[in-house]
């Protein structure tokens, strides 16, 4: 990694605030990828290859910035999908079609990248195609047989990161790699099943925003799509293994003004990471219950999670010492109200919902349950709590009731801070806490405390950008949909979280 990259990683504000810093952002983009304090390792990682910290990393520090090696442009996916929609299609069919079309288009785009490399050439454009092709092929290693792993696996971080800015020495090494793997690239390009395997194991879709919600939005033309990418390959990011208790987070920003594709991924550490420690993030929403997360991971990615959080939560279900807890039965009873984007009209009445929440909280606050395990379990029911907050605040409630909600939201904050400090639900909870605290006239110091908590959470997710929370709220696409409106929940005509 050249030293210039390390300096550039210190301040990425121009990459987000493009309107006033276009020149600076273009300078950064011309050097992508930017590789921070990370390295690829096959030891001390969850499985196969992974990323580890090459030195001690501070919370909020940028780990890398990278563009995709291939992508399915959102407008192309949208156009093809709308053309294939039929009047008789139900919600499941529409969602399945959307996912299949996105996958098919990414397959086509990826084959095109590989085919361009095969055509050869020695100019800069050909070299760029070569690096992109290598970054894609390098992802095969840990998902195939030992024989194919010997043929395809490339562990050089510059190759996997699609780094066209590497030194001439590295470039020579890359040319040797291309010579050795050219026949293999041809084989990959001719095998749809191999490319699909890469896509299904390594691609980044609409993250935790489901295809189902995108399909609904496109059909009704309601609101803007917060992504310029719907399915892409980010080979370096694909090296990061899963944990339900992550220490890193990713966000996206467009690579060019008015560009409809090529979203840049920016990864930050959300906790302090020691040298040699693995960098992990979650493949599924961390705010879902234990059994739901495990089911999603198994069905989508084909493995059983063995992270620290899952081990602690699993003890609740297999240890006879927790027979009194009856957590699983209670969660299954509340699952209907733990669904995302619940309709306010379908939620229980305030008094009934309050009784359920207080019963659940009494269960989790029992001193026989380790505090850390309690926080893990509570995090898995975040949507249950936020639905209660929405139902409560849609009614006329007094200051005492609002203080009770603040106390409950504070517990969610502490739980999320110990599980996944960088997620968007946490930001929304913190905005709620700030506004509720501001209304407690006898405790004005509370709003100062929550203002600082907001700043910390933003700094972890966006690095130094967190210093200007209001500017973030106005500019960042991915915050616009989840952060609280400035007027506060009392003037909002929709769920505040």
Image: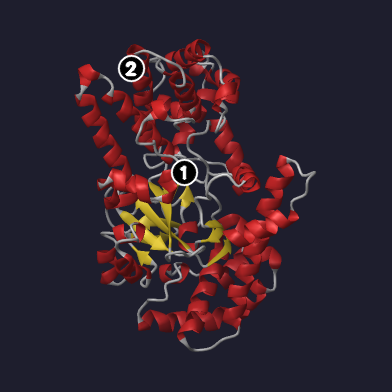
- 254 or 321: nearer the viewer: 254
User: In the image, 155: left or right of 346?
Assistant: left
Q: Is residue 135 above or below residue 182?
A: above
Q: Quadrant of residue 34?
A: bottom left
User: In the image, 23: left or right of 209?
Assistant: left
Q: Is residue 12 visible?
A: no
Residue 243 image label = 1
Residue at the bottom extreme?
122
Q: Quadrant of the C terminus?
A: top left
**Residue hosting label 2:** 403
Residue 303, given in percent of the width and then of the height, sits at: 59, 45
The residue under the point 42% across, 60% down is 41
Estimate the spatial distance between the alpha carbons at disc 2 and disc 1, rounded to whole Å. Answer: 34 Å
**Which element type, helix, strand or loop, lies under badge 2?**
helix
Residue 270 image label = none
Q: Is residue 212 above or below residue 332?
A: below
Q: Is residue 165 above or below residue 78?
A: below
Front position among marks 2 and 1: 2
Residue 348, given in percent of the width and then of the height, sits at: 56, 16
């Amino acid at each position: 990694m050249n030293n210039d990259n390390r300096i550039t990683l210190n301040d990425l504000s121009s990459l987000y605030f493009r309107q006033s810093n276009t020149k600076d952002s273009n300078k950064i983009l011309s050097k992508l990828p930017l590789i921070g304090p990370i390295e690829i390792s096959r030891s001390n990682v969850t499985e196969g290859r992974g990323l580890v910290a090459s030195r001690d990393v501070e919370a909020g520090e940028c780990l890398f910035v990278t563009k995709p090696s291939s992508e399915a442009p959102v407008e192309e996916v949208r156009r093809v999908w709308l053309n294939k929609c039929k009047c008789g299609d139900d919600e499941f069919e529409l969602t399945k079609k959307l996912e299949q079309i996105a996958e098919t288009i990414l397959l086509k785009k990826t084959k095109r990248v590989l085919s361009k490399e095969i055509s050869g050439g020695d100019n800069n454009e050909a070299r760029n195609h070569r690096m992109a092709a290598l970054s894609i092929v390098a992802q095969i290693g840990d998902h195939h047989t030992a024989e194919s792993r010997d043929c395809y696996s490339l562990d050089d971080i510059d190759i996997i990161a699609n780094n066209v800015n590497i030194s001439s020495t590295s470039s020579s090494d890359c040319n040797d790699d291309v010579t050795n793997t050219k026949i293999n690239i041809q084989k990959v390009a001719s095998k749809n099943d191999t490319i699909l395997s890469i896509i299904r194991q390594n691609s980044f879709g609409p993250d935790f925003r489901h295809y189902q919600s995108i399909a609904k939005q496109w059909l009704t033309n309601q609101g803007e799509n917060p992504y310029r990418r719907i399915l892409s390959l980010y080979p370096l990011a694909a090296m990061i293994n899963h944990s339900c208790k992550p220490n890193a987070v990713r966000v996206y920003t467009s690579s060019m003004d008015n560009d409809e594709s090529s979203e840049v991924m920016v990864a930050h550490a959300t906790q302090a990471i020691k040298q040699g420690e693995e960098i992990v993030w979650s493949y599924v929403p961390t705010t879902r219950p234990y059994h739901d997360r495990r089911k999603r991971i198994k069905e989508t990615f084909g493995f059983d999670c063995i992270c620290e959080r899952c081990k602690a939560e699993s003890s609740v279900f297999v240890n006879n010492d927790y027979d009194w807890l009856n957590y699983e039965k209670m969660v299954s009873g509340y699952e209907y109200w733990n669904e995302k984007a619940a309709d306010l009209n379908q939620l229980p009445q305030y008094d009934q919902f309050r009784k359920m929440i207080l019963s659940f909280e009494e269960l989790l606050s029992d001193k026989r349950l380790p505090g850390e395990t309690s926080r893990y379990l509570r995090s898995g029911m975040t949507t249950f709590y936020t639905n209660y907050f929405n139902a409560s605040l849609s009614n006329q409630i007094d200051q005492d009731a609002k203080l009770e909600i603040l106390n409950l939201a504070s517990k969610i904050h502490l739980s999320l801070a110990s599980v996944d400090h960088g997620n968007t639900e946490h930001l929304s909870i913190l905005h709620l806490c700030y506004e509720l605290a501001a209304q407690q006239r006898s405790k004005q110091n509370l709003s100062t405390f929550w203002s600082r908590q907001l700043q910390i959470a933003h700094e972890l997710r966006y690095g130094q950008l967190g210093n200007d929370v209001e500017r973030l709220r106005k500019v960042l696409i991915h915050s616009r949909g989840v952060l609280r409106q400035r007027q506060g929940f009392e003037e909002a005509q929709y769920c505040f979280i």
